Amino acid sequence: METKDFHKKIIEFMKKWDEKRGVAPSEQETFNHLIEEIGELAREIVNRESRKDKYSNDKLNNAIADSMMQLIKLADLRKIDLEKEIIKVIDEETKKYLS
């Protein structure tokens, strides 16, 4: 699957999910969900290191995926071509640090 197709699939799903929940998509709502997912990711990483009995690999993987989806949704709401921006950052960082 091409990157743009992957992003489109995520955005289509997120729009349906928002409609189902009766939520109007906004940058703030998306940012809030992103922070929530990062918190879940952090909890699982702490659990993996300090509370092994509470650690769940599935929850960790899910938090990573959900975080990625929220970032893609935020980029879409801001009309950012995420692929273009990532390539730009890679190029700039490569010139700055890897040349």
Image: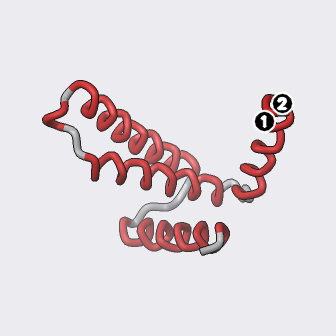
Badge count: 2
Measured as percent of width and height from the top left, residue 75 is found at: 64, 54
Residue ID for mark 1: 93
Question: The residue under label 2 is which amino acid type?
Answer: Lys
Measured as percent of width and height from the top left, residue 88 is found at: 80, 47
Residue 54 left/right relative to 57: left
Spatial separation of the CA atoms under disc 1 and disc 2: 5 Å
Q: Secondary structure at mark 1?
A: helix
Q: Residue at x 28, y 47 (%)?
A: 57
Residue 69 left/right relative to 45: right
Measured as percent of width and height from the top left, residue 60 is found at: 33, 46
Q: Residue at x 44, y 47 (%)?
A: 33
Q: Are marks 1 and 2 in contact (CB under 8 Å)?
A: yes
Between 93 and 14, the residue placed more toward the observer is 93
Q: Secondary structure at mark 2?
A: helix
Residue 84 left/right relative to 41: right
Q: From this viewpoint, which residue is outermost toward the front? A: 99
Question: The residue under label 1 is which amino acid type?
Answer: Glu
Residue 79 position by quadrant: bottom right
Q: Residue at x 48, y 66 (%)?
A: 14
Residue ID for mark 2: 96
Q: Tell me how the rendering is colored.
A: secondary structure
Quarter of the figure that contains the N terminus: bottom right
Residue 40 left/right relative to 95: left
Q: Residue at x 52, y 44 (%)?
A: 31
Sort mark 2 into few (<14), some (14-19) or many (20+) by Cα contacts within 10 Å.
Answer: few
Measured as percent of width and height from the top left, residue 82 is found at: 70, 56
